[in-house]
Amino acid sequence: MLVFVIRRLLQSLLVLFVMSLLVFAGVYAVGTPIDILISPEATQADRIAVVAALGLDKPLWLQYLLFVQHAFGGDLGKSFAYNIPAIQLIFERMPATLELASFAMLLAVVIGLPLGLYAGLKPKSLPARSIMAGSILGFSLPTFWVGLMLIMVFAVWLGWLPSNGRGSTVALLGVPVSFLSIDGLRHLLLPGLTLALLNIALIIRLTRAGTQEALLTDYVKFARAKGLTDARVVGVHILKNILIPIVTVIALQFGSVIAFAVVTETIFAWPGMGKLLIDSINVLDRPVIVAYLLIVVAMFILINLLVDIAYSLLDPRVRLSDAGTN
């Protein structure tokens, strides 16, 4: 088990290094932030001084080596626009993004799981067919359009929910959260539902497929033959066995939700990492862009690593098959 974990850690470090190189080269090789950050009335001497102060006068390869050297000390650069460490800016916005992503995944599970179960247990009924048709819309509709439609209906026409911002926050262990206040929850509903839509459709389809497959197994047929109630058959013998792949997908999708929160945060002016990224792109704030992308990549790697370790703990065949390939 220890060898398995060490191997996965080394692979993760290699992926993170390669991604840092690609991200840094892709961001720093495009455009120049000087024209945006400095006044048009500035002299040539002022421009040269600013370029030197930001370290942009050095060759790209040397900038990357300096970046890697500082990154080992936890320094991912200083924001050009705010003149504070980029990682500090991102960590200040991270709780809002994590809260939105967690709320979206919670909505996806609470809505998608029972709908998928119903569609799997009664596949030929009209409600089940309607659920599956709705799941196709969940995959098809673009996030920005869904967000705009929700704003138009619930914020503009009905006036039930706010259309932007995070609302009132309450400190939880020193971290500001929205879900502990009524106003915060009202602000959380529309962006959370927008971000959850794709995963609701995904969980519906996974649950339906798993349920129909489980209904054909011998242990479910035997449980019904023993006279167990439908609720017990579904809760103990079906749901319990289909949850493993669903939980795995949910864990992997959580990283995607964090990454794709950029669009939702921009539409609803949600003060998270995604909106910070868009604002930084507008002014070519390179350190913040690079730091954001690397932190998101690191989250993806960490989530995948935890899923791999969890699978190896739950199923020793994963470790054995991995060892057999070496």
Image (cartoon, rainbow, N blue to C red):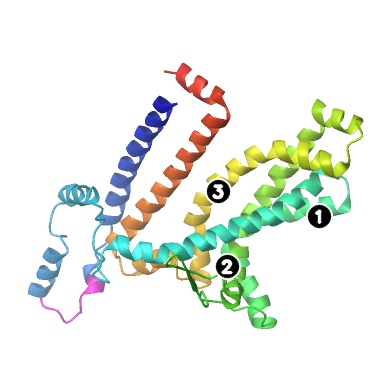
Observer-side mark, 1 or 3, equals: 3
Location of residue 101 with respect to 125 vertically, above or below:
below
Q: Which mark is residue 191?
A: 2
Image quarter (top left, top right, bottom left or bottom right) of the C terminus:
top left
Q: Residues within 10 Å of mark 2 (few under 14, many from 20)?
A: many
Q: Amino acid at mark 3?
A: Gln
**Measuring 63% from the left and 38% from the top, which residue is drawn there?**
245
Residue 163 within the segment the image draws in magenta: no
Location of residue 151 with respect to 225 vertically, above or below:
below
Q: Amino acid at mark 1?
A: Ser
Q: Position of residue 21 (x, y in %)?
A: 28, 45
Seen in the image, is 23 located left or right of residue 194? left
Q: Position of residue 198 (x, y in %)?
A: 62, 55
Image quarter (top left, top right, bottom left or bottom right) of the N terminus:
top left
Provide the residue designation for mark 1.
Answer: 130
Residue 37 within the segment the image draws in magenta: yes
Of helix, strand and loop, which one carries label 2?
helix
Seen in the image, is 239 located left or right of residue 168? right
Q: In the rendered structure, which segment of residues is drawn in magenta?
A: 35-43
221, 256: nearer the viewer: 221
Seen in the image, is 296 located left or right of residue 197? left
First along the sequence among labels 1 and 3: 1
* Prevailing SS of the magenta stretch: loop
**Measuring 64% from the left and 42% from the top, which residue is drawn there?**
246
Rounded to the nearest angstrom, the CA distance separating label 1 from label 2 is 24 Å
Provide the residue designation for mark 3.
Answer: 253
